[in-house]
Image (cartoon, helix red, strand yellow):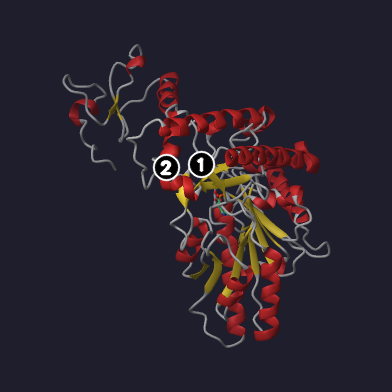
Amino acid sequence: MSREDGDGGAADRKGTRAPGPMAASELVPTYAARELAHGVPRDRLADAGMPPRVAYQVIHDELRLDGFSLLNLATFVSTWMEPEARDLISETLDKNMIDRDEYPQTAELERRCVNILARLWNAPVEGEAVGTSTVGSSEACMLAGMALKWRWRERQRAAGRPTDRPNLVMGANTQICWHKFCRYWDVEPREVTAEGDRFTLAAPEAAALVDENTIGVVVIMGSTMDGRYEPVAEVAEALDRVEREEGLDVPIHVDGASGAFVAPFLQPEIVWDFRLPRVQSINTSGHKYGLVYPGVGWVVFRDRAALPEELVFHVSYLGGDMTDFSINFSRPGHPVIAQYYNFLRLGFEGYRSVQQTCQDVALYLSGEIARLGPFELITRGDDIPVFCWKMSDDYADRANFSLYDLAAKLRERGWLVPAYPMPKNRQDLVVQRVVVKEDFSRELAERLLDDLKAAVAWFESQPGHRATKSGSHFHH
Ligand SMILES: Cc1ncc(COP(=O)(O)O)c(C=O)c1O
């Protein structure tokens, strides 16, 4: 509740505004004065409503102050879908995903999507991969983390060992959802910190942190920090060695929020998925390189043994016996429908072509940024189409601006290109990152380059300017 709450007083309770200074808690959309001659309380429900067109206009106009999604190079989340997908979405806005008995065809599309992903990720053909849609990767990671914790507890109990100190091994670069998982489910996070030019998990360091209380190791395909793939096969090999030498069988969960929708199309030679027996579960965000608007995620388990039956609820009061493995209950069905639309519409070749185009733009743009002079690439965008750069050391010594200043300057032109420090142990290093998505064309990349050059020239023409040391960290 805002501090302004209660400002409005008795006069605006009646829906009319008292003469005198405008109350801070009121929205007064003057353009709508023909139909809305009085103020509207902002933080409490007005006594009376307003015509639909006016309500639409008030909200529509206020939202225009948001950033323009086409220029949002910070987000990994899709900002464009085809008009036919939008039609399907608006036709199905009324469907609740949990009502699988009432909407069996929506449930059927979800089932097909899980099967498509399980095959794409090479689940054993003779096995029985299981999975579910979620609101995004965060929920998918919670579910996968819970499965790891439950299975570890069973192993510990069976061996007569204590079950009170579970830990999860991961890189310090993991997305916040893994920190949430550890805090919400009382699991100790064991982080492999960055070292020198290594900003992701490395196999020997991960294996060294494992003990009998380790529920699993999270390996990321497409680090949020710099777009790099972590070495899943190397981690699996290191854990095989731990098993041979110490008898500890530690499973891997692959967080493929971005990369699980990129690697199968662009780097089929990288073995990171269910081909590795140690990989027990994989999550992805349908709303990232799955090319769907928010919010849809997926988690797939290599077989039934990887998903403890205890975690699956059988719901009968909706009619029929429905299985439910989720944190939410109600959620929209349309993102799942939109995912299936993309699978049908694009097929393997369509996805490959979209991801390849994004990668081509990323490689072009990163190459040009490297040629500008002041910047040095940390990554080029050759894993997922995401790359970042730092200020080169000799330029930084004489620069009168920081990457935070550059981000703010680009924002004047509408571009959202975040600057942020690298993870623990390398927080001294500030980088700036671009996420190339389907609607970011080569033409737009050229315009961003022009604006980057103009911004650098502007700073260089302002000898009195001083570099800012911190800024808004709007990365994800
Ligand atoms: C590696 C990784 N894991 C998990 C997430 C969380 O994904 P979501 O936004 O779909 O919940 C992200 C988001 O950027 C991510 O990059």
Question: Residue visible at 41% across and 39% down?
Answer: 405
Residue 437, horizontal then vertical, whole percent:
62, 38
- Placement of the N terminus among the 4 image quadrants: top left
Nearer the observer, 48 or 333: 333
| Label 2 crowd (10 A; few <14 / some 14-19 / many >=20) | some
Query: Are the two marked residues, 1 and 2, in contact with CB atoms closer than 8 angstroms?
Result: yes
Q: Which mark is residue 209?
A: none
The image shows residue 405, relative to residue 127, as above or below, that is above
Residue at the right extreme, as displayed: 126
- Name the element at disc 1: loop
Residue at the top extreme, as displayed: 34
Q: Which mark is residue 374?
A: 1
* Labels 1 and 2: the sequence-earlier one: 1
Can residue 11 be seen here? The reply is: yes
- Disc 1 versus disc 2: distance between alpha carbons? 9 Å
Question: Residue visible at 66% across and 78% down?
Answer: 249
Residue at the bottom extreme, as displayed: 160
Q: Which residue was labeled with disc 2?
A: 399
- Name the element at disc 2: loop
Identify which amino acid the numbered label 1 is placed on.
Pro
Nearer the observer, 363 or 77: 363
Question: Residue visible at 62% across and 80% down?
Answer: 155
